[in-house]
Image (tube, rainbow, N blue to C red):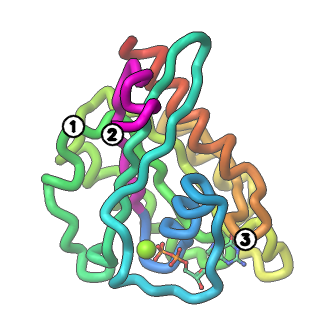
Amino acid sequence: ANSFDEECDYLFKAVLIGDSAVGKSNLLSRFARDEFSLDSKPTIGVEFAYRNIRVGDKIIKAQIWDTAGQERFRAITSSYYRGALGALLVYDITRKSTFESVRKWLRELREYASPEMVVVLVGNKSDLGQSREVNLEDGHSLAQLENLSFMETSAKENMNVEEAFLRMITRIYELTC
Ligand code: GDP
Ligand code: MG
């Protein structure tokens, strides 16, 4: 065991969901390892990544699960959601269809996940403003309607990525610790 394990006060599981190619794996690699990749390798995703976060005087070990591309086949199973306290629900601001899928993902969350789960809606690829198909206001309105936190991010430019994960993690901490 490393020193992080010994210092860890809480362990949280959270999941990434959203349509294929919206940037889930790159958001996670940015958050966990500060890496970004131009290739999409949907079938070689890691199962999960860890990062330790300090909140006040506590250390939280966040275990973030990524899909291995199952979302393309609508084959995410209940075990993926089991025990998860938080989710980043990601769409791509340059593809309206991925925003329209958000309701489908929320239905799936309601079916499989705990009703108290902390969900942050994330509009990713904010660096591609010229190709935008989903307005910032549309993201805000949907989040408000569904009672979710909301943020636009860019995994590529490392904009708001840390903030989105931290918002989810600190909210889980406030609700459960
Ligand atoms: P996933 O299927 O949801 O895991 O999506 P990936 O993380 O594999 O990303 C799909 C594609 O979008 C890849 O080519 C990434 O390089 C690209 N991508 C991911 N995030 C961003 C971003 O913030 N900005 C831009 N411009 N491209 C991104
Ligand atoms: Mg992926």
Q: Is residue 134 above or below residue 113?
A: below
Query: Residue 136 location, x and y as percent?
Result: 75, 55
Q: Residue at x 33, y 40 (%)?
A: 13
Q: Which label number is shown at residue 13?
A: 2
Q: Is mark 3 within 8 Å of ligand 1?
A: yes
Query: Residue 56 location, x and y as percent?
Result: 61, 12
* Front position in the image: 168 or 89: 168
Q: Residue at x 35, y 33 (%)?
A: 12
Q: Which label number is shown at residue 83?
A: 1
Residue 2 covered by magenta stretch: yes
Indicate which disc, 3 or 2, sits on the residue closer to the N terminus: 2
Query: Residue 66 location, x and y as percent?
Result: 37, 62
Q: Is mark 1 within 8 Å of ligand 2?
A: no
Quadrant housing the N terminus: top left
Q: Dot 3 corresponds to which residue?
A: 156
Q: Is residue 40 above or below residue 154?
A: below
Separation (CA) of disc 1 from disc 2: 7 Å
Separation (CA) of disc 3 from disc 2: 24 Å
Report the span colored magenta: 1-17
Number of numbered tags placed on the structure image: 3
- Label 3, residues with CA under 10 Å away: few <14, some 14-19, many ≥20: many
- Disc 2 is placed on an element classified as strand
Residue 85 occupies quadrant: top left
